[in-house]
Amino acid sequence: MAKKDCIIIMGSARSQGNTKQALSMIPGISGAPMVDLKELDIKPYDYEYKNQNDDFLALIHRLVEYDTWVLATPVYWYSMSSTMKTFIDRISDLLDIHKDVARKLRGKRLFVVASYNTSLPKGFEDTFEQTCGYLGIEYLGTSFIYSGTENSELLQNNIDELQKSECIFEQTD
């Protein structure tokens, strides 16, 4: 995949934490531009749209220039981080008041990298898959990267997860 076709959107409480380390393990996306949501001012979804002066819309205008988005998030309480959830919730702004921008999401591709430290979460992918279906985005799947050191079975599983991600990025060339 050409680097210009892919952008990473990282939603972690630690910019240099396990999620960033998990990203560095995936050769198909190393070197791609990255947005660290932690560094931006993105307010929660607001039915009255009083949040329009934050960084969300400018970020979306940048992101729609890329064909493939890689969402990178740690697994917190069996789900994505609150930072990532806030970002996804704000897509509602596009559907409500920025419809021209929302239409630009159709045909994009989305891949998720999820770092975890205990056990694989059940149903983690459902939110991403259903959101993509609703928006007309091709969901490419999720690679779950174990960030612990104690569980040799989960460490071995990382090899399979990294191979899965490499295959996906080879297919999108």
Image (cartoon, rainbow, N blue to C red):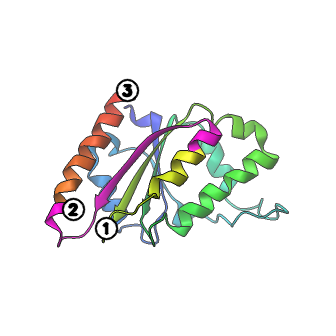
145 is higher (above) or lower (below) than 119: above
Looking at the rendered structure, the kind of residue marked 3 is Asp
Range of magenta residues: 132-154
Comes first in the chain, label 2 or label 1? 1
Q: Residues within 10 Å of mark 3 (few under 14, many from 20)?
A: few
- Mark 2 highlights which residue? 154
Q: CA distance from mark 1 to mark 3?
A: 32 Å
> Observer-nearest residue: 76 or 3?
76
Looking at the rendered structure, the kind of residue marked 2 is Leu
83 is higher (above) or lower (below) than 135: below
Which residue does the image show at 72% across and 63% down from the upper left? 45
Q: Is residue 136 left or right of residue 125?
A: right
In the image, which disc is placed on residue 173? 3
Q: CA distance from mark 2 to mark 1?
A: 8 Å
Q: Residues within 10 Å of mark 2 (few under 14, many from 20)?
A: some
Q: Residue furthest front?
A: 122
In the image, which disc is placed on residue 30? none
Label 1 vs label 3, nearer the camera: 1
- Mark 1 highlights which residue? 119
Which residue does the image show at 61% across and 58% down from the upper left? 87
| Secondary element at image label 3 | loop
Q: Residue 146 at x, y = what percent?
A: 27, 62
Instruction: Using the rendered view, name the quadrant where residue 105 is placed.
Output: top right
Mark 2 and mark 1 residues within 8 Å of each other at the beta carbon: yes
Looking at the rendered structure, the kind of residue marked 1 is Ser
Instruction: Using the rendered view, name the quadrant where residue 99 is placed.
Output: top right
